[in-house]
Image: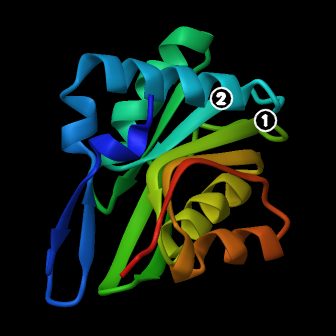
Amino acid sequence: MNLKNFIRSIPDYPKKGILFRDITTLIKDEKAFAETINQIVEKSKKYKFDKIAAIESRGFVFASAVSYILKKPFIMLRKKDKLPADVHSIDFELEYGTATIEVHKDSIKENESVLIIDDLIATGGTAEAAAKLIEISKGKVSAFIFVINLFDLGGAELLTKKNYKIENLINFPGH
């Protein structure tokens, strides 16, 4: 199954000049969604990890299913002020603005290894911030798995240069 055929491209969203890769068309098809989860699970077998983390919000869709299948704890990396207990926070740059993500301070124990799953990597700012959250929590990033890599926006290269392991299912140009 070619998962690329299930991704809808929307020009000029959320602003002019951005070609948005929409995963809703992938997740609404039960066979394509199941294949996506199966491929993520298969790729995750290359790595040793204690927990799975995902970046709000679309990463949750994939990571929670993988967490269930692999019987691994699931950690939510959320937008600012969405978590009720004490948090670690990281501010970072997006390709069209700035943002903050947070994790509960008690989510990761020292030296625990975490697999990070997200729907897409573009410039890498969000993924790098997620890695920093794991590390300030005294955990280690096992690897990243993305459904989509926007290969010409440089995010995968940014993470690779920082010695993170990266996997993805689909490659698209970012523009």
Q: Residue at x 79, y 60 (%)?
A: 164
**Which residue is denoted by mark 1 in the rendering?**
112
Instruction: Please provide percent x and percent y for residue 90.
Output: 51, 71
Disc 2 or disc 1, which is closer to the eye? 2
| Vertical side of 15 occupied by 84: above or below | above
Task: Describe residue 44's horizontal placement relative to residue 69 as left or right.
Answer: right
Q: Cβ–Cβ below 8 Å for labels 2 and 1?
A: yes
C-alpha separation, residue under disc 2 versus residue under disc 1:
8 Å
**Which SS class for mark 2?**
strand
**Which residue is denoted by mark 2 in the rendering?**
51
Instruction: Please provide percent x and percent y for residue 64.
Output: 42, 25
Q: Residue at x 73, y 46 (%)?
A: 143
Neighbor class of circle 2 (other Cα within 10 Å; few <14, some 14-19, many 20+) is many
| Image quarter in which the C terminus is found | bottom left
| Vertical side of 50 occupied by 56: above or below | below
Question: What amino acid does circle 2 point to?
Answer: Lys
